[in-house]
Image (cartoon, rainbow, N blue to C red):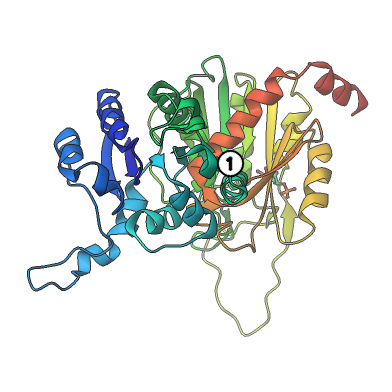
Amino acid sequence: MRITLGVTGGVAAYKAAELARRLQQDGFSVQVVMTRAAREFVAPLTFAALTGQNVITDLFARDTSGSANLESAVEHIAVAQRTDLLLVVPATADILAKFARGLADDFLSTLFLATAAPVVVAPAMNVNMWQHPATRENIEMLRARGVRIVEPGEGYLACGMTGQGRLAELEDILAAVRDALHLKRDFETETVLVTAGPTCEDLDPVRYLTNRSSGKMGYALAQAAARRGAKVILVSGPTALPAPDGVQFIPVRSAEEMHKAVLASFSSCTVAIFAAAVADYRPAARHAHKMKRTKAPLTIELEPTPDIIADVARHKADRLLVGFAAETDHLAENARKKLAAKNADLIVANDVTAQGAGFDLDTNIVTLFSRDNRETPLPLMSKSEAAQRILDELVRLRSLPHTASASRRSAG
Ligand code: C5P
């Protein structure tokens, strides 16, 4: 996995060198980005030697004539796309302010805006700067947007004062990195069934009804669950995606086939996640030959497909069930209705009209509606990060007293 380590201008910058080494020892590939001020404290060569990779220091690298070259002008986007985690150690008050307000006047602040990867920052500064209302507000703003903050410790500070502001212990920073990358194995006792992608409902041998689902969210869930130790069965409609490593892959085409595949696997699963965009209707008749064009208007009769999740929910027992709600209006109301109607433990709702959310994108903006009436809005994030948050919520739901689902079952 690739970590981009941003180093900003504080005395603790020298500790980032040790951190870069530790991350490498843990098997991460580390790309260092340094701000101008950071380079006043530690030379880029230190990091280049430790990581074996060039250190990025400027938004625009210059060629021999002194002009900015084209590659460097788009480099922040390339780094943003290939990084699995952005870690900033130490993070100064200045970079926190830039991140919070969306300024992008150097490589690191531009990268922050351009990446959908999780972000971990470990601030270090003078105690008064740390306690200043401006810094407090920036920290809270970043936290609310999903940035993980590794709080500074208390003690003697390089400026001569004593108080909170010294960089957190490297062990705590490493633990936050592992946490943000979800390198835990908390699904080892679970078998997770995931449906993904669209379904195709054939009209004749060449024509079919379908929808715009890419399968990306379901595949991200399957992959995340497998990485966290689950046995995973992925039942997928036709997509352009490769099957994730380490999952049992069952390709299907229609809602009917998906229904059958889910019924066959449901008894062996402990968690079922219905991320597929199943067609609600299919042509009532499938023509054996290609339908011919005529001058007359054509009406196609459609019949409903089986509601897979509602069907298996009748036999859910202790299984955790997750449904998706892709809505264009009344998001919360529809999601809560679906939670009850489908006897689900969790509904992942997204407004597919919102920018950055919905079909065929790598990012999503979802709100989690849980059976204990908890509502968790998540900010814009990559689908793989959203998948991790959904699994985190399942871990929480698993730990709730059993009576919650038992009473719902008896009520339903
Ligand atoms: O009722 P609606 O289609 O909006 O519900 C969406 C949820 O139900 C999704 O989780 C989807 O995978 C599931 N679903 C299903 N079978 C269908 C239709 C939807 O499992 N026929």
Can you say whether 27 is above or below 336 in the image? above
Which quadrant would the N terminus be assigned to in this image?
top left
Question: The residue tagged with tag 1: helix, strand or loop?
Answer: helix
Is residue 165 in sight in this rendering? yes
Q: Position of residue 390 (x, y in %)?
A: 61, 35
Q: Quadrant of residue 387?
A: top right
Question: Where does residue 317 sit, x and y in percent of width and height?
Answer: 75, 19
Residue 37 vertical placement versus 66 (above, below): above
For the residue pair 82 and 37, the one nearer the viewer reads as: 37
The residue closer to the viewer here, 285 or 196, is 196
- Report the side of 62 relative to 281 (left or right): left
Q: Position of residue 161 (x, y in %)?
A: 47, 32
Badge 1 density bin: few <14, some 14–19, many ≥20, Cα 10 Å: some
Q: Which residue is mark 1?
A: 131
Give me the residue at 19% from left, 45% from top: 44
Q: At 26% across and 35% down in the image, what residue appears?
A: 29
**Residue at x 65% of width, y 52% of height:** 279
The image quadrant where one finds the C terminus is top right
- Residue 61 lies left or right of residue 293; in this view the side is left
- 369 sits to left or right of 129: right
Residue furthest right as drawn? 411
Q: Which residue is more in the foreground, 100 or 262?
A: 100
Disc 1 beta carbon < 8 A from ligand 1? no
**Figure quarter occupied by ligand 1:** top right
Name the residue furthest left. 64
Q: Is residue 205 left or right of residue 55?
A: right
Q: Residue at x 59, y 31 (%)?
A: 391
Give the residue at the far bottom of this rendering.
295
Query: In this rendering, does residue 252 appear at all?
Result: no
Percent x, y for residue 367? Answer: 68, 46
* Amino acid type shown at disc 1: Gln
